[in-house]
Amino acid sequence: MGRSYRNNKYISADDGQHFLIDVMKTRSFGNIVDFQEVVRVHKRIEVFMKSVHINVDFGIEINIRIVEIHTWIHSAPLHVSCFGTKRRLYDFQQQSPPSERAWFYCKGRWPCCLCSCCNAKLQFSRKITYGKWGENMLSFWFLNHDLEDDELRWQLDEMKAKRFTGIFIHPRDGLNVPYATELWFAKVSVILEHCGRIGLQAWLYDEEPFPSGAAGGQVFFDKPEFKARYLTMERFEVQGGRVKLDFAPGRFLKTVAIRHTRNGLSREWLDLTEHTGLMRSEWTPGIVHHGIYYPPYEDSGNPHWRSGTIRPHYRVDCELPEGDWTVCAFVEREMTAGCWGAYTDLMNPDATRHFIALTHEKYAKRYKHLFGGVIPGIFTDEFKVIHDVAWSPVLSPYFHGKFGYELEERLPDLFLTIDDGTAQVRYDYRLALSKLLKSSFIEPVVKWCEANRLVMTGHISPEEDPVGQTKWTPHLLSLLKGFHLPGTDLIAGQIGSAEYPLLHLGPKMASSAARHTGKRESLVEAFGANGWETDFKSMIKMADWLFVLGVTEVVVHGQFYSIDGLRKKEAPPSYFYQSSHWPYFGEFSDYILRMSALLKEGEPRCRLLVYYPQAAFSALVPDRFDEADEQRRKLGALLHELLSNQWDFDLVDEQTLLEMSVKDGRLQGVSNNYDVLLLPYCDVMESGAARFCAALTRQGIAVWRVGEQPTIVASEGESRFNEAMRLADCHDVFWSKVVPAGQVAAELHKALARDITLWSCLPDGTALMEPAKVYVHARAVGSTRRMMVTNALDETQWTQLKHPSCDECGTADVVLTCKLPPNGSILVDVHPDRLELLVAAGHWSSVGSNPLGTALHSVPDELDSTIDLTRDWQLKPEADNVLILSHWHFRETVPQEEEGITAAPAVNMIENPGPVFEKEGYGYCRFYSRGTPGPTHLVYELSAWEGDCRIVVNGKPVQPARKVRRYDVNNFEMDITPFLHKGIGRQTNIVEVRFSSGGRLKEPFRLYGEFEVTFPYAGFPPGQLAYGQRTGRISELDSWDDLGFPHYAGTMTYIKDVTLQEEWLRAADGNGSIWLQAAEVNDVARLFINGVEQGTRLCEPFAWNVTNSLKSGSNRIAFEVANSPIAFFEGGRKRAGLRGKISLSRFLY
């Protein structure tokens, strides 16, 4: 039976054909209705269920929290209609599989529209969520090759098995399917059909590859007038008199001469535009024949000279008055860089309309019935305006209409600092760029998504660089607020720190934009461009830092369809089936899902609001780079000072600040109330913000200034160049306190009493009474305060967390001593009466210095006995060993007889491709072998060479290869066992490539088999294969490269049988626990005791509580350990496997 709210009561509404929910005003705030649970459909009405309706009453905004519809009606559509007119507003067709269930919910942050019948505002969205915690773990799935249907399905199944909840369909470099063609959409259809079947979200991506706005280049190839442009200034320093100045052609705008005074450049300008014109100066002579004039008579006439001038350029030719002058010539040019050789003018709304027609509308034409369901939304990526001074045909008229003066009359101010008025021109210019980017690109895309029930998400780059933002994405925070799901990215492996403080900006921009617009989630595209050596420890470090800065949704960059050829070097690594880490990726997904879920509950709580000094950076760019660089350095240092001293904050822009109010002595925002507004290094500041700050100080709000006294520029909508008016209106002083640089955290500690503080302490728990250097993200979850804590240092810290009531009750379980490893994190709930540890990547104890505990109330206290298990293990590789044939010698002809050595240097195929042969060509690579060769296979990639190539081993042609999946979908394998040399001692084997009609070797080959590998020549190629010598017994734990597996990437199993006495085990009964510890694991370990899995550890501590898994007598201990793939793909050395001490330790409570 169904239920609906009416006057706070449940009412059945089932007519046998439709299930009707009448949403009336109840438990409302203004005109917003908030239901925790609207309807639950039960199995017993399955035969009657045809559809589900939600009707909207007049003038009511629906904010539906959860509508759960079970799978026995998985084919029933969901309709949302106007209650008054019965006009249908939305139709959702559920696509969940029979074995799953789907969730429909809205939290006021997704697409919305107005019902044209009664003007009721409807906010509704649907999101299919699967997984243990019902949250998102998303993939950037790089479609970068031929895209075979069965392979697409197999890869989707792989991601589903690793607990991904969705994928972004991301066309990427290397795609062999023409983008946005019928073939492309046929592949997309395969993806969508399979995602619907297995319960994966299939998010769209709006570009090929990026940045967004070009439709793979089609936008400006169709219409060249949509190409992005920028303005250049040619500068000449001259003296009065006759001047002749030449500069390169383009669309010429203006030439201006600026007089120098004793103080520098002045406002005395001469317009030289009418003295500027095109000419040609370069002569080209040549001998010509009669045929150049009369083509039918090519060989007739007398040869003679002809010459002419070419290469047009501009010249300024005029007389200047006496004195020193700077002559500036302004020319508009097209951007010609990037993968398409151009980019789109995103300030032009017509260009955006064409982009939407070529991209979004094509998807809608085919898949609109899946929008809001299997397809939840679409990602837009790194769009921007281009160059130091972006330009557009629409800019000048827009600027004049917005600010009331002609931009072209102030062009020198965009490049040169003339006087104090330059700051106003530059502020207006950057604001105009931002407003045009928002109105011409972001808003049309958002409106299209809302009309089509899609979530608009993505990110804008560069987030982390205030100078880059000012050039390409000015007022970025304001732009991000327009997204349904604001995002950022994190690439290259570094996180915000004392060394890289500006990296804090990206996550803070995204989370602040979300909070200021009432959205619970913000997104990050993370982990890309890190290299193949990246391990789970590094990924967890990055994820924890992103979470503690307020990001909630993680998109993994990326899963590569293929790493064939140079694809493996295209922003690696691929966190997918090609990686040795992939079998354990599900555990990483579980961690992300768990953290994401916990950090979306409740509401964020931070007390500090930081004003983003966009106007100050606008005044410095582009000519005062040194000052701008110092400005961003100081800003980064301040942000890190705050965060690392437990002062979380939101960033704010002028528009958002002006929408806030004061309530109960605090500055009230949409999601937070703030005690202090910080104005950091606002050397130039908007008049509207300044007046607002003055009003705040009069109402008792703390407004602190850091840095120089601001120069005021007019805000949007105010008259320009009237400084006296602005200063009189906003007062000279609009702050309550000036704080020196480096003292802000200390002053905050004096001024504000925090509910909870983490203190530094000694290992024995002795508090040092100084705040720990940690990042803290706090949330209010009912009466509970949830806190995520991350070590801000690259060294271990001992910290102590005291419950606010501990001084009153004095109980031990409300004081936690924590040993946080470098960048380590914990998540803890502070309940009214207790502390509850939710997630720990560090080491915890309730009292003392326990090194192992991962649960609050079951942690060992005192080490009682240890059994050393370090020596004598059985080592078993779970796949064939590998030798990379990386170093090749090349020549243009095939030698007459085998060459043992050559004077020609070898080419490392991992780093560089071989030479290009125009005709015949030859290359060879040597390796040695000992013993009788077992099965040995030569594996190469589809893109391993160009041209017609034959492979010869020891002088014998090898039979054609078969396609296999050794490490990629595009692998090919040859059995070369019969061709290898046999005999006593070292045997030299030669692999040759022979090109009969031109070609080139581009990628190394790899040998697979049951052998061990050494490098007899001091660790350098050629390598040697040892057959039949492996016993599997190792007396000492060492890195795999020292055990005969230098290029192996995968899993090895360590096995050891241990006999335990019953007395030793019994000592831990009731008053202790037994832990298995591994000192060093590279990179991930899964433990089995007597065949039963004990769990997987992705990072330190590598410790397992095995108290209930051991038995008296013989116990088999087995570690599955996987290493990094860096050695396999790049031949690099990185420690692999177990090293150091392994122990079985008994602890007493």
Image (cartoon, rainbow, N blue to C red):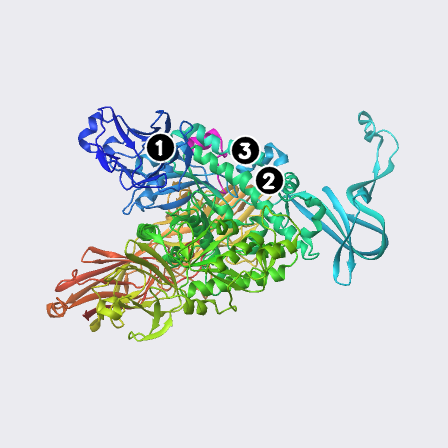
Point out the image quarter for the N terminus.
top left
Q: Are marks 2 and 1 in contact (CB under 8 Å)?
A: no
Q: Residue at x 22, y 36 (%)?
A: 9
Report whether residue 632 is seen. yes
Which class describes the residues within 10 Å of circle 2: few (<14), some (14-19), or many (20+)?
A: many
The residues tagged by marks 1 and 3 sit, at their Cα atoms, a distance apart of: 29 Å
Percent position of residue 712, x then y: 61, 56
SS for tag 1? Answer: helix
Residue to which mark 2 is pinned: 345
Of 569 and 251, nearer the camera is 251
Label tally: 3
Magenta-colored stretch includes residue 336: no
* Mark sitting earlier along the chain (3/2): 2
| Mark closest to the chain's N terminus, 2 or 1 | 1
Residue 883: x percent and y percent?
41, 55
Distance between the Cα atoms at labels 3 and 2? 12 Å
Give percent across and percent down for residue 194: 34, 35
Counting residues from the start of the chain, the first of labels 1 and 3 encountered is 1
Q: Nearer the viewer, mark 2 or mark 1?
A: 2
Is residue 175 inside the magenta stretch? yes
* Corner quadrant of residue 866: bottom left
Instruction: Name the amino acid type tagged 2.
Output: Asp
> Between residues 588 and 651, which one lies in front from this camera angle?
651
Question: Which residues fall within the magenta stretch?
Answer: 172-187
The residue that mark 3 highlights is: 353
Of the 4 image quadrants, the one containing the C terminus is bottom left
Name which residue type carries label 1. Glu
Which secondary structure lies at badge 3?
helix
Whole-Å distance between the Cαs marked 2 and 1? Answer: 35 Å
In the displayed structure, would residue 141 be above or below residue 738?
above
The answer to which quarter of the image holds residue 35 is top left
Could you tell whether 664 is left or right of 480 in the image? left
